[in-house]
Image: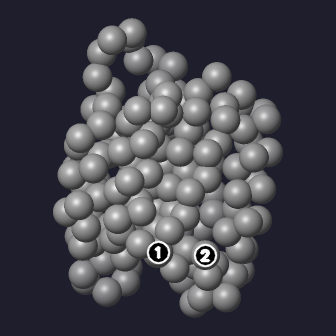
Amino acid sequence: MFNILILQGPNLNRLGKREPGHYGTKTLDEIHGEIEMLAKQEGFLPVFFQSNHEGAIVDRIHAAGEDGTHGAIANLGAYTHTSIAIRDAFLSVDLPVVEVHLSNVHRRESFRATSLLSDIALGTIGGFGPVVYRLGILGLLDALQRRSPGSPLK
């Protein structure tokens, strides 16, 4: 069974209330509930972590590199566009990551089109609302299942 870190960045705890035109009306708890149902169907263990603090996210990535976590789904929110520290944390661990965004960042402000994670991620999915988590998880699971023992998945 794969342990998958579901990493949520700043302001995602405000989903359902924050800019529903961009992010929809589902809360983070509702999205996590959908991921738990998918986990039962697909046979993986989701580990949820949300923080509004960059250092806490970096610490959690470091921990994931040591605690048997097999991969991560990361919605880093605004840190996607600004955090070299989070990028470097992923580079410091052998942890494949899929970047997800609820909104289509390329149809928004120009600064949102820059991602400091996408070039080191297995893939990036955005613009489809909460289904991006399902799509990202299925892609990550497929990559993990195809990974040959001992080879890096990057």
State the mark number for residue 74.
none
Where is residue 137, by image quadrant? top right
Residue placed at 59% from the left, 67% from the top? 129
For residue 13, the mark is: 2
User: Which dot, 1 or 2, sits closer to the camera?
Assistant: 1
Q: In this rendering, does residue 101 appear at all?
A: no
Rendering coords of residue 143 (x, y %): 45, 27
Q: Would you identify the image quadrant in which residue 120 lies?
A: top left
What residue is at 35 percent from the left and 65 percent from the top?
55
Asked if the residue under mark 2 is in contact with the one under mark 1, i.e. CB atoms within 8 Å, the reply is: yes
x and y percent of residue 83 in the render?
Answer: 25, 67
Mark 2: which secondary structure?
Answer: helix
Q: Is 51 on the left-hand or right-hand side of 118? A: right
- Disc 2 marks a residue whose amino acid type is Asn
The residue identified by callout 1 is: 52
Q: Position of residue 132 (x, y in %)?
A: 56, 56
